[in-house]
Image: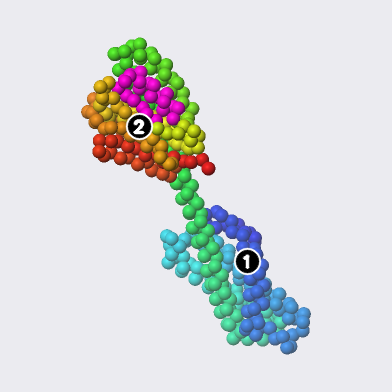
Amino acid sequence: MKLNIFTMKTANGEKLNDIGFRVILIPFFGIVIPIVTGMVPHATFSSWEIKFSYLYTILIAFVVWEGNRFLLFTLRAYFDWLNKPIKKIIALVIAVSFYTVPISILMLTAWYHIFMQGVINWQVVYDATLIMLVCVAFIVHIYETVFLVKQAENDKLKKEQLERSRVEAELEALKNQVDPHFIFNSLNTLSHLIEDKPAKAKEFNDSLADVYRYILQNKAKDLVLLSDEMQFVQDYFLLLKIRFEKAVQLIIEADENTFNNYLVPPISLQILLENAIKHNEFSDAKPLLIMVEMKENTLLINNETRKKTLRKPGSKIGLQNLAERYKLITGKEIIIQDANNTFTVLLPLLKIE
């Protein structure tokens, strides 16, 4: 592991810049500990001896701090609090003790040989070493707290990034389902028209191209103006009229002047119209009425339920796709109500501020 006296990397690779922390506390401990223990005899030392003595004790604090700091960063590569808490504690206690105590005693006795002609006060050495050991334990605790906070922040950030990636992947998959769903239903309709009404089949095919152009232009978007979506719905309804004529009706009761003030996921309403056509019985005598209303910031789409037995099993993509896309894009959920012979879907709109 490469030692850098300014910064080191945490276990997750993030750099920790603690230079200011060390610049203040290393001299602080190097001066305070000798004062507390009475190590430097101010009364008998000259001013230069006092100054050099404190420079030396600051050196001791520097060596003890930097050595333990290096050990602390090194051990983080092998032990972590989450998976190996007991081993982490044992490793820290052993490393700190077996480094701090010998280094402190060695450098303190060297001080006595340099400044006190080898007359060693072992009580002062013991007290100073013990205080340094306690200070080191305190500093190690601070470092580990900083590490844990940074790790929690990084884990949260990674979790948010993973969640964002997951949501984007799900949304992309849901968008890609729109094409096959639309094609599936359109080909069924076209197949029916070719057999029964060839002339209308051509008209349907031409109109289908216009409708499909909207899908190609907007399916990759998360949101579109409600005005664009409502125009698309009316174009799509023309396709339904080609096939079913008077058997289907669409009524839109909303102020068109407000449509440009709202956003909606694209191809939302078309799915609901498809769903109504697919699951209900209707005829010229009893047409299927689809009502679109807007109340406050919600779009209501409802129709009378006259459930029919399907000849072919549905793909079951429509409503589920719409509900999931809506939640992923807007963070809001659509409301589906099926009661009193009326099927209603409430789409929350996003208002442009």
Is residue 170 visible to the viewer in this orientation of the structure? Answer: no
Cα–Cα gap, marks 2 and 1: 68 Å
| 324 relative position to 40: left or right | left
Quarter of the image holding residue 248? top left
In this figure, which residue is indicated by the disc labeled 1? 21
Tell me which residue sits at (38%, 24%) in the image.
237
Residue 238 on the magenta span: yes
Q: Amino acid at mark 2?
A: Met
Work out which residue is located at the far top of the displayed protein and give it.
199
Region of the chain picked out in magenta, as a range: 230-252
Secondary element at image label 2: strand
- Vertical placement of residue 176 versus 77, above or below: above
**Which badge, 2 or 1, comes first in the chain's sequence?**
1
Tell me which residue sits at (50%, 51%) in the image.
157
Tell me which residue sits at (22%, 28%) in the image.
309
Q: Amino acid at mark 1?
A: Phe
Label 1 Cα neighbours within 10 Å, binned few <14 / some 14-19 / many ≥20: few
